[in-house]
Amino acid sequence: EDKVVQSPLSLVVHEGDTVTLNCSYEVTNFRSLLWYKQEKKAPTFLFMLTSSGIEKKSGRLSSILDKKELSSILNITATQTGDSAIYLCAVEAGNNRKLIWGLGTSLAVNP
Amino acid sequence: SQTIHQWPATLVQPVGSPLSLECTVEGTSNPNLYWYRQAAGRGLQLLFYSVGIGQISSEVPQNLSASRPQDRQFILSSKKLLLSDSGFYLCAWSVRSFWGTNEKLFFGSGTQLSVL
């Protein structure tokens, strides 16, 4: 059965810290891996990764895919309170290109 | 620019009552449309998706149904709500790229449904 596992499930840090969130997967016919940020209600898109070893960056956030290890990490440097959110990982897989979602990592950044 | 509207934001309904949640997308044509449910402490569960008018695929057997009467309108319904239908419901849309892979999903702001 296809699955996506995120770790840790929750994390509390102080402003200015750097955090690394993990997403590992076991799926058939991997196509892409996506990261979303869910602050209050609607998840918003962060990154889509398809190629191993190529880092995607957006400001203080970056992500990289390791197809050998079947995993991805999301890095946030110099965290701010506005980074507090649930970070969701999803993997697109299979011939029907279904999205399989992880449970998310709840990040709290304290001032 | 594209926008997605989902309503209502919150809903409290008694067990056994009907349900209708509506979602509309503006600024794009022929979108793929999705209904997800997010229970507390769980990830997103895909309920239904649609690639065109009248075309609905159900991912899990349940007490709910979906309809797509117009290209950019997606409705989630139930004839009789159960306690287990409580949760956070999200509508989303995506556009298929030229290469046939899914583009990213754009989500509505969600409906918090409480069945009492």
Image (cartoon, rainbow, N blue to C red):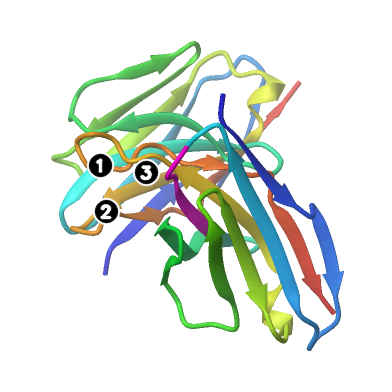
Q: Which residue is mark 1?
A: B101
Q: Please give the range of residues in magenta.
A: B29-35
User: Is residue B43 visible from the viewing direction of this image?
Assistant: no
Amino acid at circle 1: Thr
- Discs 3 and 1 lie in a common subunit: no
Quarter placement of the N terminus of chain B: top right
Q: Please rate how many residues cluster around mark 1, counting C-alpha atoms within 10 Å: few if below 14, some from 14 to 19, many from 20.
A: some
Viewed as shown, does residue B71 lie left or right of A3? right
Q: Residue type at mark 3?
A: Cys
Same chain? Circles 2 and 1: no
Q: Which residue is mark 3?
A: A23
* Tag 2 near tag 1, CB within 8 Å: yes
Read off the chain for label 1.
Answer: B
Residue of label 2: A97
Q: Is residue A89 left or right of residue B115?
A: left
Indicate the position of residue A100 as horizontal and vertical percent values: 37, 56
Q: Position of residue B72 (x, y in %)?
A: 55, 48
Q: Is residue A21 magenta?
A: no
| Residue A109 in the image: above or below residue A27 | above
Determine the chain carrying the residue at label 2: A
Q: Residue at x 13, y 40 (%)?
A: A68
Callout 3 and callout 2 share a chain:
yes
Residue B48 percent location from the top left of the image: 48, 66
User: What percent of the width, then of the height, locates residue A26?
Assistant: 24, 56
| Distance from the alpha carbon under mark 3 to that under mark 2 | 19 Å
Camera-side residue: A31 or A110?
A: A31
